[in-house]
Image (spheres, rainbow, N blue to C red):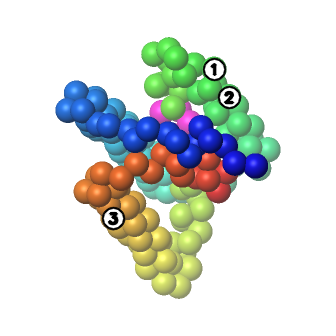
Amino acid sequence: MQRNDVLTKAPITLTLEKASVGNKVLRNTYLLLSMTLLFSALTAGVAMATNAAPLHWLITLGGYFGLLFVVTRLRNSVWGLAAVFALTGFLGYTLGPILNLYLSLPNGSQVVMTALGGTGVIFLALSGYVVVSRKDFSFMGGFLMVG
């Protein structure tokens, strides 16, 4: 069964006003993403420097899902931003002992830095491609959320 409304959609036109609003949203999104990643890295570094013991798996799961629930509940308030930073800080803190484990292995620092560098390069390259090509990748939203 074909859906005619999908096939006969009018092309999306992008005016200068819409483009500037889109660029502002994109800029703010990347700014928030970079701040939360830096905060997560800071808390992971603190956990590594203090040689923090891994948390019990029930505490870890409770913290993850509890903070995720809080972020969802507060998403439309100013406290939602604080909840996002609490979640990313907790994620970073629980990552610290795992990184210490990998760093204690032979060539562990190479493994950690390769994963970090590879992730950064891939993210930067794909983001650059999207910005330069100006293609609309919103059709991938469902796939990326499930995947």
Q: Quadrant of residue 53?
A: bottom right
Q: Locate the C terminus and report the quarter of the image it occupies.
A: bottom right
Labels 3 and 1: the sequence-earlier one: 1
**Disc 3 vs disc 1: which is toward the camera?**
3
Q: Secondary structure at mark 2?
A: helix
Q: Is residue 59 left or right of residue 21?
A: right
- Specify whether residue 94 is in view: no
Tell me the tag on residue 69: 2
Q: Quadrant of residue 14?
A: top left
> Which residue position is annotated with label 1?
73
**Amino acid type, callout 1:** Arg
Q: Is residue 12 left or right of residue 59?
A: left
Q: Secondary structure at mark 1?
A: helix
Give residue 90's position: percent from left, percent from top.
Answer: 57, 41
Assess whether mark 3 and mark 2 are in contact (beta carbons under 8 angstroms): no
- Specify whether residue 108 is in view: yes
Tell me the tag on residue 121: none
**Disc 2 vs disc 3: which is toward the camera?**
3
Magenta extent: 85-89
**Amino acid type, callout 2:** Phe
Q: Work out which residue is located at the far bottom of the displayed protein and give it.
A: 106
Please tell me which residue is depicted at 64% across the width and 31% down the height of the picture: 67
> Which residue position is annotated with label 3?
125
Mark 2 neighbour class, 10 Å CA radius: few under 14, some 14 to 19, many 20 or more: some
Report how far apart the C-alphas of labels 3 and 1 lie in the structure.
33 Å
**Amino acid type, callout 3:** Ala
Q: Work out which residue is located at the far left of the displayed protein and give it.
A: 16
Assess whether mark 1 and mark 3 are in contact (beta carbons under 8 angstroms): no
Assess whether mark 2 and mark 1 are in contact (beta carbons under 8 angstroms): yes
Q: Is residue 143 left or right of residue 22?
A: right
Q: Main secondary structure of the magenta part?
A: helix
The correct choice, above or below, for 147 with respect to 69 in the image is below
